[in-house]
Image: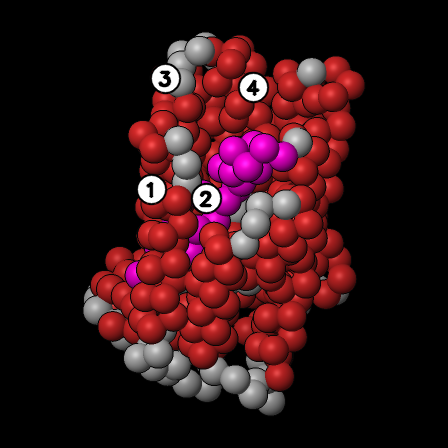
Amino acid sequence: MADPANTPAYRPLLLVLLAAAGTFALTMGARQSMGLFVGSINTHTGLGLASVSLAFAFGQLWWGLTQPLAGIVTDRHGPGRVLVVGVLLVALGTALIPMMTSTWGLILAIGVLAAGGAGMAGPATLMAATTRLVAPEKRGLATGVVNAGGSFGQFVFAPLAQGVTAAAGWMASVQTLAALTLLALPAAWVLRGQAAAPATAAAAPAPAPPREGTRAAMRRAFADPSYRLLAAGFFVCGFHVAFLGTHLPGVVASCGLSPEIGAWSLAMLGLFNIVGSLGIGWLMSRNRWQMKHLLSAIYALRALAVLLFVLAPKTPAVMLVFAAVMGLTFLSTVPPTAGLVARFFGPAHMATLFGLVMVTHQIGGFLGAWLGGQAFEASGSYDWIWIADILLAVGAALLHLPIREHRPQPQPAAA
């Protein structure tokens, strides 16, 4: 007979999904809409596209670096307080952007405060909370829904931000996004109190092995070749996502198309990423395909789509169709990547270990955002970045094939 004290306290699935997906929608929607303001910030500050891109690139890196740290706190104390601090930092950093006129000021507002807060209230914390709060058989679909929440936020926020910009200016639009992120605060109460419980001294029929420590779990993860391959593939995802999120409006402008097309291209990324995230979650729940094969297929589709876009004429219809296809693959890599981390190591250190994978994702993100601006200032086009993106996507598709979808047995922590 199961011990009630050791039975996981699952919460209503709909409530958990609304809280986690809603938080991701608000923080990710505000963050992914910032690409609309790159040109306005450049004009306002006069710093040059490379300097503005550096602030966004640092934000990509810091968003990743904060996630394993937030993951450690989440694993020990639960996600509630982590989410509150994260949401407040996103709102503060976003609100300060119009007041910054130097490169270091932009790095502080965009790269440290807003990006760091989004990292604390980001996938590592939200996926770990969801994984612990729902039954194991529902985790694949649940993580897909949470991931789709971030895309829904981008779909709503991008045209909203463009509309406010047209009506009241870009500064008012940024302040509006900052205020909207505060709506995520109540979700922290729903997702609170789900720390990984340490072993207790209560009497039991058979003593449980000591709970593995965080350092031991990290050492075991880094020693696993499959974990390293997964992280290397996620680096490519970060390069691609950050380049599109930061520079897609610039790509649209360089093709002689209107700012409205840039806003709707970002919105199409978000809309079709909802389809991609829900679809990948459904495929994972069917248990008919290995998650590594799903990841390889996503990266291969990404490479093919970019190649066709480079060869196609740059019309509004082509731009929107390209954004839609990219949306299908945009963040649909997150659920199977999180699923593989959970399969390898279980939920106890999920936030920490997935957060470490997110670091490699955001190192790629730093390069995608920064090199996009550097390439355009040097050559007047984004052609070299597209070529690099194709080659990296093909490499990532091949990297996932040797992954072994096993779960290593945890080793007890040293006394």
Closer to the chain start, of discs 3 and 4, is 4
Dot 2 or dot 1, earlier in sequence: 2
Residue at the spot of label 4: 40
Q: What residue do we see at 69% from left, 16% from top?
A: 169
Badge 1 amino acid: Leu
Q: On the picture, is 236 further left or further right than 83?
A: left
Residue 243, horizontal then vertical, whole percent: 45, 43
Tell me which segment is drawn in magenta.
231-257
Q: Position of residue 58 (x, y in %)?
A: 37, 33
Q: CA distance from mark 2 to mark 4?
A: 19 Å
Question: Pointer 2: what residue?
Answer: 242
Color style of the picture: secondary structure
Q: Secondary structure at mark 4?
A: helix
Please report whichever mark, 2 or 3, sits nearer to the chain's N-terminal start: 3
Kind of residue sitting beneath label 3: Trp
Real-space Cα distance between discs 4 and 1? 22 Å
Residue picked out by circle 3: 104
- Tell me the quadrant of the picture where the C terminus can be found: bottom left
Residue located beneath label 1 in the image: 367
> Gap between marks 1 and 3, in whole Å?
18 Å
In this orientation, which residue lies closer to the viewer: 92 or 296?
296
Between tags 1 and 3, which lies in front?
1
| Marks 3 and 4, how far apart at CA | 17 Å
Q: Residues within 10 Å of mark 4 (few under 14, many from 20)?
A: some
